[in-house]
Image: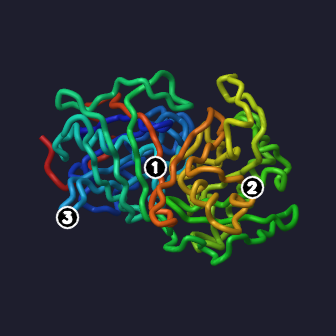
Amino acid sequence: MRIPVTIMRGGTSKGIFLNMDHMPSDQALWKDFLLDIMGSPDQRQIDGLGGANSLTSKAAIIKQSEIEGVDVEYTFAQISVDHQLVDFKGNCGNISSAVGPYAIAQGFVTPKEPITTVTILNTNTQKIIKAEVEVEDGQVKTEGTYEIPGVPGTGSPIYLSFTQAEGAVTGKLFPTGNAIDMIKTSKGLIPASIVDVANPLVFVKAEDTGLTGYELPAEYSEDTLYYLEEIRSQAAEICGFAKKEEATIKSPAVPKMTIIAPPRNYKDSSGRERKSEEMDVAIRMMSMQKPHQALAITGAICTTASAFLEGTIVSKLVDIHSPVIRLAHPAGIMETKVDFIAGQMQGIKVMRTARMILEGYVYTKHNYQVAHQLA
């Protein structure tokens, strides 16, 4: 089969963007369809579009919305590289940053200069995201001077606002009802905060895991990764996603394992010196059981919210001086901003860049009945 496809970079992730009309009409076939396109399971994804990394094995499925006040509906899929698995449980903030530009380019949203605001319903979490996209001469503007760590060069800034993102996957701000839980591991009890804002994260202090919190992705041993997955699997069971013995296969993407540490000087993955006074907290996330090369946007949103939630491990570590939180990750430092109204947190905003890389067709190995007949 020949399927129209767009490949886009959104933030520090890259994925395939598909019109929902071109997806199999039987949603039960979506998993096999996406695995087919990506070339999974295979560590190299040699027979598909996947990039042999969890950050480049993602899909966004988009349709124009008929819901009042919503422009497009967007379903995110995390496609496993080496397992017969597609996870639809959570969202990806980086991929979300490319949904607005895609919607404008596809004619789902009428461009308005200089800024087009695209209202997005993420169907995974049933949460609204607003994307502010720069437009010039009726087209999405990609050139600009804004730089994000982990992406070469600069681009036009895209402002993403996450509002009322609490309980995105579990329906609860604190899935367990507690700001801190004691998780039983093979090395003893470890305190953790499980928080669900934009995506559920399980936070632990680096010192409690034997880490500094400033490790770069290549510096984790297999034993350390196994231990971190042990903690995450326990949290997955507590959240009700899967039994701990099955969490790696049945719920690999959520909750997301997150390690935090207090500010200190460090070198990022490009070798650039980062100073302790430039950050509020260091964060290291896992993505599909591997160290994230940068920082997931939903992870940044959840961490920011957690810094303002009394009693969490994050709020006890972060010394808040302003609504702007600076998060030090392997590729650099990301800033988020909290919007307050009458002292209440209303939303969290982050800046990204995105661009279209390819527009064309992908050929599948198998035939699928799609919603609309393709020419």
> At label 1, which amino acid type do we have?
Lys
Choose between 84 and 326: the one closer to the eye.
Answer: 326
Choose between 306 and 217: the one closer to the eye.
Answer: 306
Tell me the tag on residue 317: 2
First in residue order: circle 3 vs circle 1: 3
First in residue order: circle 1 vs circle 2: 2
Marks 1/2: CA distance?
Answer: 22 Å
Instruction: Name the quadrant of the N terminus.
Output: top left
Q: Position of residue 92 (x, y in %)?
A: 47, 50
> At label 2, which amino acid type do we have?
Leu
- The residue that label 1 is drawn on is 349
Is label 3 in a helix, a strand or a loop? loop
- The residue that label 3 is drawn on is 68
Q: From the viewer's perspective, tell me whether residue 160 is left or right of residue 52.
A: left
Q: How is the image coloured?
A: rainbow
Q: Position of residue 194 (x, y in %)?
A: 65, 66
